[in-house]
Image (spheres, rainbow, N blue to C red):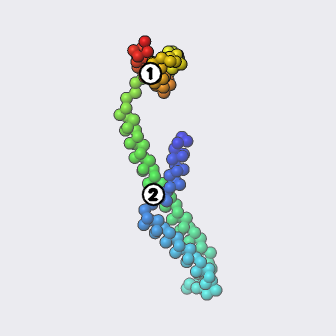
Amino acid sequence: MAREATHKYVCRQVAWNVLTTRQQTSMIKQLQMCFTMLMDQKMHSSTALTDDMGMDLINHPIWFWLFLLQCIVIVILVFLLVEQKINARLAVYERNRMQEYGKKEVDLVNVMKSINSSKELYKELSLKCHPDRYAGDPRQAIARELFRDISANKRNYQKLREIQEVANKKLV
C-alpha cells in the first residue's frame, strides 16, 4: 500500500514531464493569455464597455468568475489527462512484472526447509568451516571461501546442503 502511495506521489511530481512539449507550450500560452486579458481589463476599467442593456462588461464580476472557472476546468482536465497517462504506464509496468514473475518457479520444499531447518544447518556448517579452526593449515583459504558462502546463504537450505557436500569433500 505504501509502495503504491509512493508511486503515485512520484508520478505526480513528474507529471509535467509526461506532457509533450507542444501540450506544455499550449497550456502556458493559454494561461498567459487569460491572465493578460484579466490584467488588461483591470487596467482599462476606467473606459467602461457596455452591452445593449447598459451593463458595465469589464467591471462585472461574472467575467472574473467565468475566467476563474475556465482556469480551474483547464487545470482539472490536464490533471486527469496526466493521471490517465500515468495509470496506463503503471498498468503496463505491473503487467510486465507479473509476466516475469509468472515464468519463475518456486521450490516450496526448499522454502519450507529454509524456514524450519536452515538455522541448525547454518550453525553446524559455520562451526565446521570456520577459518579459525584451520589456522596455519593450507585448508584455511578453502574454509574462508566456504564460510563466506555459508554466511551469504544462511537462509537458503538447498544452498547450505550443497555447501555442506563441498565442505565434506574439501575439508576432510
- Image height of 27 relative to 171, above or below: below
How crowded pointer 1 is (Cα within 10 Å; few <14, some 14-19, many 20+) is rated as: some
Residue under the point 37% across and 37% down: 100
Q: Residues within 10 Å of mark 2 (few under 14, many from 20)?
A: some
Task: Kindly identify which residue carries mark 2.
Answer: 18
Image quadrant holding the N terminus, namely: top right
Q: Look at 59% across and 80% down and name the residue there.
A: 41
Q: Residue 53: x, y in percent?
A: 58, 84
**x and y percentages locating residue 90 in the rendered image:** 44, 47
| Secondary-structure class at tag 1 | helix
Q: Nearer the viewer, mark 1 or mark 2?
A: 1
Q: Quadrant of the C terminus?
A: top left
Q: Which of the marked residues, 1 or 2, is nearer the chain's N terminus? A: 2
Using the numbered discs, state the Cα–Cα distance from disc 1 to disc 2 in whole angstroms.
54 Å
Viewer-side residue, 90 vs 57: 90
- Nearest to the observer: residue 118 or residue 37: 118
Amino acid found under the numbered disc labelled 1: Ile
- The residue depicted at 52 percent of the width and 54 percent of the height is 12
Q: Is residue 133 above or below residue 94?
A: above
> Which amino acid type is shown beneath numbered disc 2?
Val
Q: Which mark is residue 50?
A: none
Quarter of the image where one finds residue 96: top left
Name of the residue lying farthest toward the bottom: 47
The residue to which callout 1 is attached is: 142
Nearest the eye: 131 or 92:
131
- On the image, the x and y values in percent for residue 116 come to 50, 18
Residue 93 can be seen, yes or no:
yes
Residue 110 in the image, given as x and y percentages of width and height: 43, 21
Q: Is residue 140 above or below residue 72?
A: above
Viewed as shown, does residue 59 lie left or right of 129? right
Residue 160 visible at all: no
